[in-house]
Image (cartoon, rainbow, N blue to C red):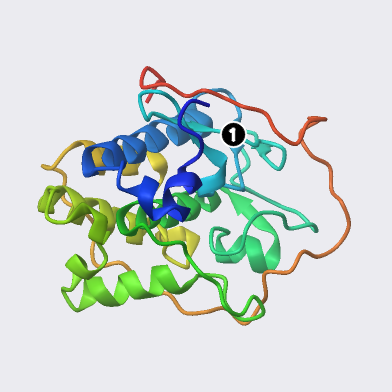
Amino acid sequence: MQNSSLDHYISDRTKGQLLDWSKRFKIITGLTEGLVYLHKGSMSCLVHRDLKPHNILLDYNMSPKMTDFGSARTLSSDIAEGRTSRVVGTCGYKAPEYASRGVYSTKTDVFSFGVLVLVIISGQKNTVLDKRVDTVGDLVRDACHMWKDQRLHELVDPLLGDRYEVAEITRCAQVALLCAQEDPADRPAMTDVAAMLNSESISLPMEPKQPAALIHGCANRGTTSTYMGQSSSTIEVTITSSAPM
């Protein structure tokens, strides 16, 4: 891919300067459209289960492309969630219910999306210092504290300076925190996320609930379970802005 992965820009602060706010917002909205398509674009929904900066490639227009569908699962329209005995994915981006109990649904991707948005806003990774007790990550908790204390400006990547729309970045941060709530029932669907990001006239829900670390760890458990019949661990799928909402 022409511009490598999102991780390339988060890990390298020199390259991170190339991501102004307009590009970051474009990545956020592109990911939103892509996830709406995965979750609602066909008879069965596709849950990625491993969304992270490394799996978000950027094309020559800095439009995001989700890759690495090797751990993805399908859910039929009449099934809300699934369960696996083998948890895969990356700590700091895995939803708590998936990391601790192997339960996955579209809300699993919603959590990961919320973390990704916070990473894009802050230029920081979501660090998990103790995998045995923490499935949320420092960035999510810090962002919640900043939001509650009205210190959101401290979350914004210093590389952006003051070159961003305050209302836009505030809305993105609030939506991200709603997505990264610990209880999947509290998280919005991606269709709702798209509506909240695309229209300033839509009122956002109440304050995001503050996360707490779960006692359960992030370690992989159990035996291998059946995947989607995909033999490759990496399948690139291009989601463009024309994807159906």
Does residue 126 appear to the left or right of 192 in the view shown? right
For the residue carrying disc 1, how many other residues have a C-alpha within 10 Å: few (<14), some (14-19), or many (20+)?
many
Please report the residue visible at 57 percent of the width from the left and 71 percent of the height from the top.
Answer: 135
Please report the residue visible at 76 percent of the width from the left and 54 percent of the height from the top.
Answer: 84
As helix, strand or loop, the secondary structure at mark 1 comes to: loop
Does residue 83 appear to the left or right of 187 in the view shown? right
Residue 190 higher or lower than 14, as above or below: above
Residue 136 higher or lower than 33, as above or below: below
Residue 242 occupies quadrant: top left
In the depicted view, which residue is nearer to us: 228 or 122?
122
Q: Name the residue under label 1.
A: 67
Measuring from the top left, give residue 32's x and y in whole percent.
38, 37
Measuring from the top left, give residue 104's x and y in whole percent.
63, 52
In the depicted view, which residue is nearer to us: 110 or 130?
130
Q: Looking at this rendering, what residue extends furthest in the top direction?
A: 242
Please report the residue visible at 16 percent of the width from the left and 50 percent of the height from the top.
Answer: 203
